[in-house]
Structures are given as C-alpha cells and as structure tokens.
Image (cartoon, grey):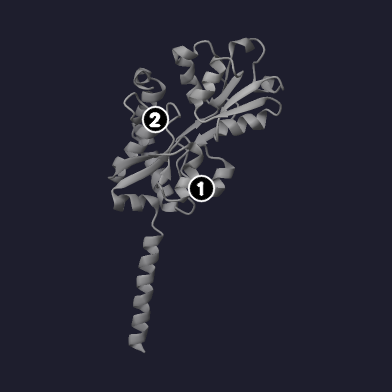
Amino acid sequence: MIKRFCSALLIGAVALIHAGVSAAGALDDAVRRGVLKVGTTPTYTPFEMKDKQGRIVGFEVDLLRTMSRALGVELELVVVPYTELVPGLMAKKFDLIGSGMTVTQERNLALNFSDSFIVVGQTVLLHPRLAGKVSSIEDLDEAGYHIAVNQGTTGEAAARRFLRTPRFSSFVTPEEGVRQVVEGKADAFIHDAPYNLIAMARPENATLLSLEQPFTFEPLAFGLKKGDYDSVNWINHFLNQVAQDGTYDQLHDKWFKDTDWMADVE
C-alpha cells in the first residue's frame, strides 16, 4: 500500500512538472531559447520602420532591444503583414507582437496585452484643395470625399466608424495612403498622430494640410497569447522600471523630439 501510494505521488509530481513546462510563458521559452522572437510590420514611423541599410529601427524596436537585454537574450524581429500578426502569434511563429498595436476591446478578446507604453490618437492629413472647407473629422462625412486609410489598422476602423458616407480606399502601407493625397487621388488620409506628424515633415509632403487634434484615444501595447500572465507581469514590471530610471524618456526624446534619424530612414 505504501509503495503504491509513493508511486502515485511520484507519477503526480512528474505530471505537475510536465504541466508546468507546457504552461510556461512566452518569455520563459525565449530565455530557454536564448532569443526573443517578436512579430512586427516595419511600416509605422517612428515605431518600427526600415532604414536605408534595410535594418528595422524605431522607438518600439529600441524598447524591445532594451527588453531583450534585460532578459539576457537576443532579439529576432519576424516581419509579417499587419493583418498576419495575430494569426502568426497563434501559430507560434513568434513570442509576442511588437508592432504599434492599439489595445481594443475586440483584440483584447483574442490577446492579452501589456500595460500601454504610449498613447496616440488618429489625425487627418488633407489635400490643400480642402483648405477652409474641412476643420474637423465631421466635415469629411460627405459622399463626395475620398478617404485613404492603412489596411487593417485602427485608423481604418476609426475612419469607417466616424465617417459613413465618403468613399474609402485601403492601402498596405501608410506611405501609399499619404501619396494618394499628395497626388490628389484622395482628399484625406487618416492614421496615427505620430506617423502623420513625421509625414508632414517630409519635403515631398510639404503641400499637405493637417488636422492635428486627435479624434480618438488609443493606447499601444505588446500583445501576447491569452493566459500568458507571467509574461505580461514581467513586461509590465519592465515598462515601469524603464519609466522610473530614465530609459523611456531617453528613447522617447530620440524618436519624437530629435529629427536626426529621419535622414537615415527610407
């Protein structure tokens, strides 16, 4: 009886060990592997984008590099289209999503999110022919207008939510959307405020007008699989640490106050 009881305990202990391994979080897996794999779409200036050498750089990328160093692992950026980020995470192609992703109620049903690392909002870039005609998002809600948006983003969702009557065109990259307005093929482009602010600073977009006041409130965060609370907990403590020790402010100033990096970006 005692032997049988001890055997049962041993079997139970082994089962618990295996269950613990299988339930390990994404960051635990990354530490064992020595590499943190992050899904990203490098088209969101200044969060993740490619420089002239083809390297992926940006504010969020620097945060991820700092996170990887804190974990003691290498960072591997896995590039996928924005619409493939959530499916790629579910298919275990990467450990987490780091791609300027806004926390929405719909996405939060499919993912766990870390605390937000920045809050942005949607703004509007306008063709100069709309000068004096459009001063708010509501003024664009007319059937004669053509609105460009970035496919699969909260900018597209917000535009379609606020505007019922214009014609919409969705583009794979925000650069394409902006170009449509510059060339007069669209009346307006709707996207996140940080991107639009930097787009306005580019010489080729100098003729554009801007409605600078954001009309939405959008926290950006890192996305992980549902139930991965250990990884969420670690990332939240990491974000708090870099906020307190000055690292966050240093990176924020580098990408949002300085403009030297713009010369190195495509």
Q: Residue at x 36, y 89 (%)?
A: 1
Residue nearest the observer in this picture, 202 or 109: 202
Q: Nearer the viewer, residue 50 or 192?
A: 50
Residue that badge 2 annotates: 59
What is the secondary structure assignment of the residue under circle 1? strand
Q: Is residue 214 above or below residue 234?
A: above
| 123 on left or right of 40 | right
Residue at screen point 45% across, 47% down: 89
- Tag 2 or tag 1, which sits nearer the N-term? 2
Residue ID for mark 1: 111
Disc 1 to disc 2, C-alpha distance: 22 Å
Residue type at mark 1? Leu
Quarter of the image with the C terminus is top left
Where residue 182 appears, as percent x and y from the top left, is 54, 15
Q: Amino acid at mark 2?
A: Phe
Q: Quadrant of residue 213?
A: top right
